[in-house]
Amino acid sequence: MTEKPSAIIIGAGFTGCALAYDLTLRGFAVTVVDRGEICNGTSGRTHGLLHSGARYCVNDPEAARECIEENIILRRIARQCIEFNQGIFLAITEEELAFKNEFLKGAEESRIPVRWMDKQEILNREPTVNPDVKGGFEVPDGSFDPLRLALAFAASAKNRGARFLPFHEVEVIHVNGQSAVDRITVIDHTCGEIKQIHADVFINACGAWAGKIASLAGVSVPVIPCPGVMVAFEKRMTNMVVNRLSLPGDGDIIIPQRRMSVIGTTSFEVEDADYIPVDQDQVKTMVERAAEMIPDIKNAGIRASYMSARPLIQTGSDARSLSRTFKCFDHLADNGLHGFVTITGGKATTCRVMAEKTADLVCAQFHISKPCRTAEIELDPYRTFYSEQVLL
């Protein structure tokens, strides 16, 4: 092969930007298209938790292991985006205290380092915590800046030759007579121009919208958009990420973000992820639940409440119990469709490994044996996305 194989990535969220970086390092000519700007979808509406995996260690161990492995890598390669503030799972009630051993077993099996803290140590570290707290586990959670993380991956791709086309919305995916995707029709919303873009392979990295994009190519992806409401407060209530020592539920996590605190999150299913109004009853429930951990949060002003649609892989369960792991769909093997791959599911914390597994699949289809290097190299400064620097 004398020329670089060309790849079009549809979606400029965390995974699309990380995949652009990975494929560029492996020798592809990469273009990323998105109907909006970088991080304009779910990636731009996350609460910014760097997951330790502890939240899922009892009911979703696969996702827990993915999170802790990628947590360690991101702490090394994306330091510019992260606040290394740790997290704590609080036992406020006797029921939560009784969950202690089950949680500890899950954490150990998932290889997540945890440490028990008694009541006094917790209150010394975080004085705003409910004084009725009975203890809790310290875990390696953290918080990150969502836009900076996406831009750091995007900058690392662009500085090595990748091209980004924001405000280019995919209208048609063309499948030729050989059952292969060979081009897409996009509308450039900056000028209204209709464009045809050809490539050797197209990767659908649209998260909660992955099913919609896949249908344009005539294939099905069982992804369910599962929105959750988040509430941002005009005061930083803690320095550590605060969680309830229980299975995941509504209003059970508070993430410090600069001078704010963000409560997460509810979980329900919708068919259309484009417009999801904020349910004020959910906001009220979230605040009440969060106040059980940090009572003074009721006295802090609400800065904003907003929705974010997670892309969860359909398994027949309810939204809360669906796995937070990811899946790469090989449409050649599954549907006989050449030149089209889908990656969806997962968490912001796992975007790098999602990109790695997708790039592995794409490289295998092109008989390219270059290994992934994204876990080894520190990401370029996110600000360089807006510079003209190119590293070839």
Image (tube, helix red, strand yellow):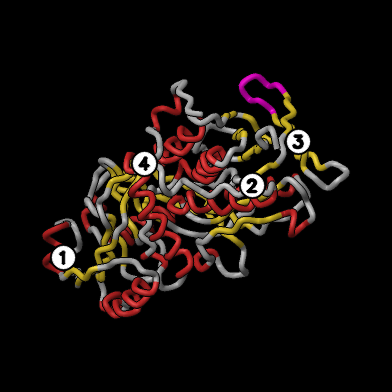
Q: Earlier in the sequence, mark 4 or mark 3?
A: 4
Q: Could you tell me if the residues under marks 2 and 3 are in contact, i.e. CB atoms within 8 Å?
A: no
Mark toward the viewer: 1 or 2:
2
Secondary structure under the numbered disc 2 in the rendered image: loop
Q: Residue furthest right?
A: 177
Crowd band around label 4 with a 10 angstrom C-alpha radius: few (<14), some (14–19), many (20+): some
Range covered by the magenta-colored residues: 187-193
**Toward the viewer: 119 or 178?**
178
Q: Could you tell me if the residues under marks 4 and 1 are in contact, i.e. CB atoms within 8 Å?
A: no
Q: Which residue is mark 4?
A: 145
Mark toward the viewer: 4 or 3:
3
Mark toward the viewer: 1 or 3:
3
Q: Earlier in the sequence, mark 1 or mark 3?
A: 1
Q: Which residue is mark 1?
A: 131
93 vs 282, left or right, is left
Image height of 367 relative to 131, above or below? above
Q: Is 191 included in the stretch rendered in magenta?
A: yes
**Separation of marks 4 and 1 at Cα, in angstroms:** 30 Å
The amino acid pointed to by label 1 is: Pro
**Separation of marks 1 and 3 at Cα, in angstroms:** 61 Å
The residue under the point 36% across, 52% down is 50
